[in-house]
Image (spheres, rainbow, N blue to C red):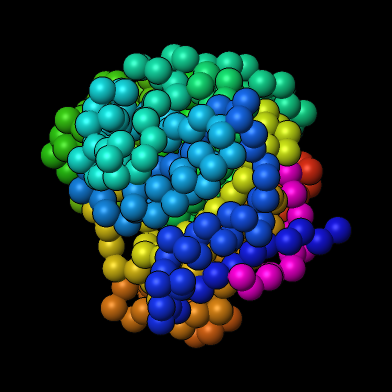
Amino acid sequence: MTADVYFSDFRARSRDENRGMKIQRLFDTAFGDVFSEDDVVAVKVHFGERGNDSFVSPVLVRYIVEKIRESGASVFLTDTNTLYYGSRHNSVHHLETAILNGFDYAVSGAPIIIADGLHGKNQRTVRVDGKHFSEVKIAGDIHDASGMVVVSHFKGHGMSGFGGALKNLAMGCATIEGKMEQHECAKPIIRGDCTSCGACIMECPVDAVCLEDGVRIDYERCIACMNCLDTCENQVFDLDWEKDIPEFIERMMEYAMGAAALKGDRICYMNFLMNITPDCDCVPWSDQSIVPDIGILASRDPVAIDTASYNLVNQQPGHRNSLLEKNHGVGEDKFRGVWGDVDGTLQLRYAEGLGLGVMDYRLICV
């Protein structure tokens, strides 16, 4: 079986070729009349952490909102609160950050609903048939929406290699408790020699780190937010990349399966291959992109669109003034050039095995 993935590059020499027009042509071609006036449609975006500016611009998201409104459907922008304690850990701070980053109604054309509620407790349980989960915890307002457009900034990610539509479904549609379930298998371990500076203790939001004959982690308290790993300048903390990270990716894909199953044929995917940074938009900065901007993709299949995105990125020459340390050549794996042993393609293979979609695709230029 082969899935259709529609693609438009960023070349433009007239008003008919601007990015807004390209987005709307892709929407019409890939999705047609997918929504009706009885639908309440969630546009699943990432509002960006405070200090980050590489997320998909609300100016571009508005063109998607307009296409949904043409069908008569109601539409809202949404995301879920974060497991880590940043600028989006509760809905008040999340909304403030979204508006700061430009997602005001006047710009995006739609209201914002943080789908898992004030403190991430608005959730629904969805049955899945997975190796790790029999049920997953999905944000209540994403669950209750009758349709969804998953808008993803395709970029690198330190624990999954890359993040696109599948990760946006998995981590992005889960409640805080659901995010903890996905991270449960991949908590930090202690590898280096501690200098007892105490920085990790100050940054741990749940008091799971202490200094007793060196540094120790209380794993019953630990929520795998990675604050200690990110904070420590001496690289005392690490992850078990060989054992834990593959399981973490499998757990994410089972969550993605639960989120996608809710909407039947009323779910669509658009990936933006621009500002392709080495990190997720959850970090409070935006690093130099690792390859040139490429274009926009649309599909009904989350596995196919992420596979196509991954391949298109790898077909580009790598930027040598970026975090990309190797694999600069055309055809080489850019994400492994940044994140070493993390094999992001496990997302694609495991998701295909779950029946989420297919890796075999036909790229259609629009």
Residue 202 location, x and y as percent?
17, 30
Q: At 64% from the left edge and 64% from the top edge, which residue is drawn? A: 6
Q: Is 363 contained in the magenta span? A: yes
Q: Observer-nearest residue: 277 or 341?
A: 277
Percent coordinates x, y for residue 243 in the rendering: 59, 46
Above/below status of 181 relative to 299: above
Q: Is residue 360 left or right of residue 255?
A: right
Identify the residue shown where x is 74% and y is 68%.
362
**Residue 83: which quarter of the image?**
top left
Q: Quadrant of the C terminus?
A: bottom right
Q: Is residue 143 above or below residue 62?
A: above
Q: x, y (%) of residue 24?
A: 52, 57
Question: Residue at coordinates 73% horizontally, 34% vertically from top-left?
Answer: 264
Above or below, comparing residue 234 to residue 129 in the picture: below
User: The magenta stretch spans which residues?
Assistant: 356-366
Q: Is residue 126 shown left or right of residue 315?
A: right
Indicate the quadrant containing the N terminus: top left, top right, bottom left or bottom right: bottom right
